[in-house]
Image (tube, helix red, strand yellow):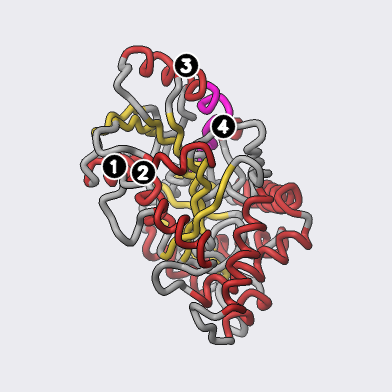
Amino acid sequence: MDRERILLTPGPLTTTLRTKLAMLRDWGSWDGDFNVVTARVRKSLLKVIHGEDSHVVVPLQGSGTFSVEAAVATLVPRDGHVLVLDNGAYCKRAAKLTGLMGRECTVLAFDESQPVDAKALDAQLAADAGITHVVLVHCETGAGVLNPLQEVAQVCERRGKGLIVDAMSSFGALPIDAREVRFDALVAASGKCLEGVPGMGFVFLRKAIVEGCAGNSQSLAMDLHDQHVYMERTGQWRFTPPTHVVVALAEAIAQFEEEGGQPARLARYTGNYRTLIDGMSRLGFMPFLDPRVQAPIIVTFHAPGDARYDFKTFYGFAREHGFILYPGKLTQVETFRVGCIGAIGRHEIEQAVHAVELALQDMGIASGEPAI
């Protein structure tokens, strides 16, 4: 193969050569030049959500899940009570980490093929006044469902509850405007729709609640309040930062801005999604979700009904043809997922569909049509 395999996953993603080349230089973690890069990244991130006046942004080492855990631990007091709106695997992960940190946690469950319901949230908050915070996954990539951020935020604001948003797979692609949507924390990461490399998360904290977060976290490394205070005072990270990840993100953000920012990125990903749906439908594949609730981030497909189908084999053949697919995350039906994000366009998606067609031929399968 004369090129790198293309990642059709929800992160890590395929990145540009410019982003890769940014990592070829070594940086001193306390050096002034690196501090300038960190400051520039933080300023640029705030612009994406129009949060310059209302929020601060706190970067954190590690995967996106590190930052979700840090946000819950930092915002929720030890005696707080978290309600997790659950319609997928990443919601369940948020509930698990909340419980492991010793916070009381209630789960309000929804079908994984449907968005969470703001009216059901309102009823739950009315029934249990002890709930202090709500966790919402904006785009639940277990199935690919887009959840109603604005409606949920309005309920939380009216009820006086803190809102923590996992925007891991939506930030940078789907519109989020802090001037119109109130949230206490919004969490995202470097290796998603900004098309950087993995290794750094970041949390937007509403300025009005930052001071009150002091002392909440039981973790030294993941205390966002301490990280923020230290960074504001010194311009530096408290502990060794992922220097190469940060400079790669700075370069990726420059390309994001050159492309036209969030609207342009959404347009490209939407084009990828439509090309994928059209191509896979021609091969007989059926999407799991109703298109009305599908985000153009990652698409879950039903597995072919042919008895010869096996995901591991299918994955291997697709990989030989240059594309990395993603396993399904659902429990009740067999599926696999195909990402629409990363430094790719319609041409690469068309090639991916052809690679899937070749993989089916390699397995002796005539159609991707499911058994249902």
- Separation of disc 1 and disc 2 at Cα? 7 Å
| Pointer 3 or 4: first along the chain | 3
Is residue 371 rendered magenta in the image? no
| Pointer 1 or 2: first along the chain | 2
Residue contact at pointers 1 and 2, CB within 8 angstroms: yes
Residue 363 location (% of width, % of height): 44, 64
- Separation of disc 4 and disc 1 at Cα? 22 Å
Q: Residues within 10 Å of mark 4 (few under 14, many from 20)?
A: some
What residue sits right under mark 2 in the picture?
72
Q: Residues within 10 Å of mark 1 (few under 14, many from 20)?
A: many
- Separation of disc 3 and disc 2 at Cα? 24 Å
| Pointer 4 or 2: first along the chain | 2
| Pointer 1 or 3: first along the chain | 1
Q: Nearer the viewer, mark 1 or mark 3?
A: 1
Which element is circle 1 on?
helix
- Separation of disc 4 and disc 2 at Cα? 17 Å
Instruction: Look at label 3 and name its amino acid.
Output: Lys
Q: Quadrant of residue 134?
A: top left
Residue furthest front as drawn: 233
